[in-house]
Image: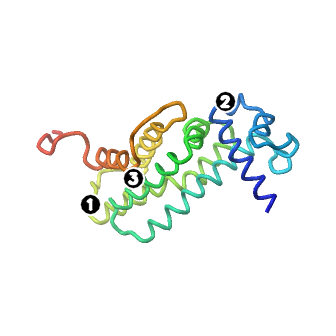
Amino acid sequence: MVVVNKHTKIISAATKVFAKKGFFTARISDIAKEAKVADGTIYIYFNNKYDILLSIFEEEIGKIFAKTEILLSEEQDPSRMLQIYVSQYLQAMKKNKYLGEVIQIELRQTNKVIRNYRKNKFSAYTNIISDIIRKGQDQGIYRPDILPDVAKRAFFGALDEVSGVWNISLETHYSVEEITDQILSLFLQGVLLGTNQVK
């Protein structure tokens, strides 16, 4: 039990330190100090900073992924499925503002380890969006000319950016429900009034 607790403490501390100082500026000693452990203890659980960062992504995004998949397995309506996806992501980002900051900035790194994670495991999470869009197209709900793989990037890009309203350096009164409704409204209905169709 002690091993699990220290591992979790280090992950939590590193998330906070990376969010505040940035990955490249942060030192192992900063993480150890935040976690209240000796510097050497970090190396019992992790090889280096990249190992810690990758663990943050795998474990924290993994939790969101798993919970989202369970909820989606009980739903068949594509629009409701998108709502679940958005809501679960935003709830996690609001709950852990440091995690949101780290995902928004550090996931875009060009390091090979992070690129591979983004290409493989993280893409499985964002592929949920393209799968939902295809489902909607098959049901005749969404436009057939929309490219699901392009749409997923636009959709998650907006979701990722908007989650920054709970950034650690900002104060906001927006609720998860309000932002979820805004994203879905913009994505599914656009900004034009119903009578103003694009020619």
Residue position marked by numbered label 1 in the rendering: 141
Residue position marked by numbered label 3 in the rendering: 148
Where is the N terminus found, in terms of image quarters?
bottom right
Q: Where is residue 18 in the image (x, y as percent from the top left)?
A: 67, 36
Residue position marked by numbered label 2 in the rendering: 21
Q: In this view, does 47 lie above or below 170?
A: below
Disc 3 versus disc 1: distance between alpha carbons? 14 Å
Identify the secondary structure beneath mark 2: helix
Disc 1 vs disc 2: which is toward the camera?
A: 2
Q: Which of 32 and 155 is in front in this view?
A: 32
Q: Which colour scheme is used?
A: rainbow
Identify the secondary structure beneath mark 1: loop
Q: Residue 177 carries which label?
A: none
Q: In the displayed structure, does residue 151 sit left or right of residue 31?
A: left
Q: Position of residue 80 (x, y in %)?
A: 34, 61
Q: Which of 196 and 57 is in front in this view?
A: 57
Give me the residue at 59% from left, 40% from top.
Answer: 98
Q: Is residue 170 above or below residue 86?
A: above
